[in-house]
Image (spheres, helix red, strand yellow):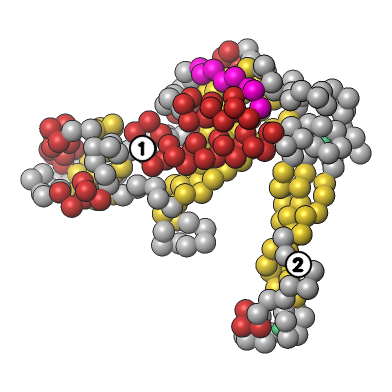
Amino acid sequence: MRSKHANRWDQRDHPYSGRVAVLSTKHDKLPLVAPPLERMVGLSVTTIAVDTDVLGTFTEDIPRLGSPLDTAIAKARLGMNASGGVIGVASEGSIGPDPSFPFVTADRELVVLVDDEADIIVWESCIGQDIVASTTTVHPGDNLQRFLTQVDFPTHRLIVRPNETGVLPIRKGIDNIKHLTAAIVECASVSPDGCACIATDLRAHMCPSRQRIIAAAAERLAKRLAQRCPSCGAPGWGCVDVLLGVPCAWCGTEIARPRAEIDGCPACEHRTIRPIVTPNFRVDPGQCPRCNP
Ligand SMILES: [Zn+2]
Ligand SMILES: [Zn+2]
């Protein structure tokens, strides 16, 4: 089936060459996101300051609703609505246990492009484990040197709040010892247990280790946009799903391991299967639930 847009995609020039997208960001992500999009598909990115915090914040003073992809799309639309642009870009990060290694903290950054004129949404993500994200509880006067070294302060900024949750104030973006000490005294004095909680400020402009992962996700999005659908020519061709099932070398039971990736188009129904293991590849019986229960 060909999309209703099938004839609208220019097959010679990239459809985004010379076009402009608006990046919704409260925290300046333009230098992270714009360069690969400009370089790889000729898309210029301008920024619009919208209060993306209404969609949720890292400090949890405003809880997030919906998936990170939903949030990123909603952010892109905030900027498109505010600017009147038809192409919007936004990024969204989630920091928490790594899906493969639960004891490792990972940062998953997603960058999305929403094109309302062509009616397509294209996104990519990147997971990084070198994110600096840590929390500690202190009394005023405690020696902080070890923690401050661990969190790469002041390159990475800090947040201080009363240790008992639900109590204000929250002091953000702290980048020097004087402000840090004052915030600890202030927050500890209003916390029923007399302690302050210090955490890494995970907002992108305060957290260089996040910035590197956002830039990597933007690079992947640009690469994907550079790939055109072999059927209709739309930008954004790439992996949309994974096929599982590789036979065990001894008994042939299908093990839930990836055997192929499905590439797809954001604009039409075209899909192709791309094997990622050779046809005679077999899984070691040690990983088979039947041979090695
Ligand atoms: Zn087996
Ligand atoms: Zn297509």
Is residue 93 visible in the rendered image? The answer is no
Amino acid at dot 1: Cys
Chain-order first, disc 1 or disc 2: 1
The residue beneath circle 1 is 207
Binning the other alpha carbons within 10 Å of mark 1 as few (below 14), some (14 to 19) or many (20 upward) gives: many
Q: Position of residue 76 (x, y in %)?
A: 58, 26
Identify which residue, 142 or 188, lies in the foreground.
142
Relative horizontal placement of residue 251, taking residue 173 as reference (left or right): right
Magenta run includes residue 46: yes
Residue farthest left in this picture: 141
- Quadrant of the rendered image containing residue 73: top right
The residue beneath circle 2 is 278
Which residue occupies 74% across, 20% down? 117
Identify which residue, 177 or 43, lies in the foreground.
43
Magenta run includes residue 214: no
Q: Position of residue 32 (x, y in %)?
A: 48, 30
